[in-house]
Amino acid sequence: MRPILADNSTSISELKKNPMAVIEQADGFPVAVLNRNQPAFYCVPADAYEMLMDKLEDIELAQIIKEREHSEEIEISIDDL
């Protein structure tokens, strides 16, 4: 059994009937769409998805910074760029 990773859930049938009503009822939060009581996929509002992508990018950039933290510095002139 897979966990449902959202506070809101709906069936595929309910989503088909009125997708925007399902999203509006979730009040900006993700909705787990269930098939036979198992999560099939998640509907994520655009604002929440954009925030998620920004956080993932921040995590990736932090990892790059950590990897380069003790690298040798190279001095360059702005004119060389």
Image: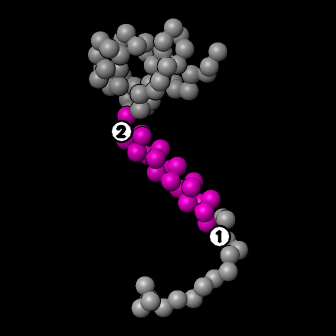
Q: Which mark is residue 68?
A: 1
User: Which quarter of the rendered picture does the C terminus lie within?
Assistant: bottom left
Alpha carbon separation for disc pair 2 and 1? 33 Å
Say if the magenta span includes residue 64. yes
Residue reaching furthest right? 70
Horizontal side of 34 relative to 73 (left or right) equals left
Residue 50 figure quarter: top left
Main secondary-structure element of the magenta-colored stretch = helix
Residue drawn at x 48%, y 91% is: 77
Residue drawn at x 66%, y 64% is: 66
The image position of residue 69, as x and y in percent, is: 67, 71
60 lies above or below 11: below
Magenta segment range?
45-65
Say if the magenta span includes residue 63. yes
Mark nearer the N terminus (2 vs 1): 2
User: Which quarter of the rendered picture does the N terminus lie within?
Assistant: top right
Residue in front for this viewpoint, 28 or 12: 12
Disc 2, SS: helix
Residue drawn at x 45%, y 19% is: 33
Residue 80 figure quarter: bottom left
The image position of residue 4, as x and y in percent, is: 56, 22
Q: Mark 2 points at which residue?
A: 46
Q: Identify which amino acid the numbered label 2 is placed on.
A: Ala
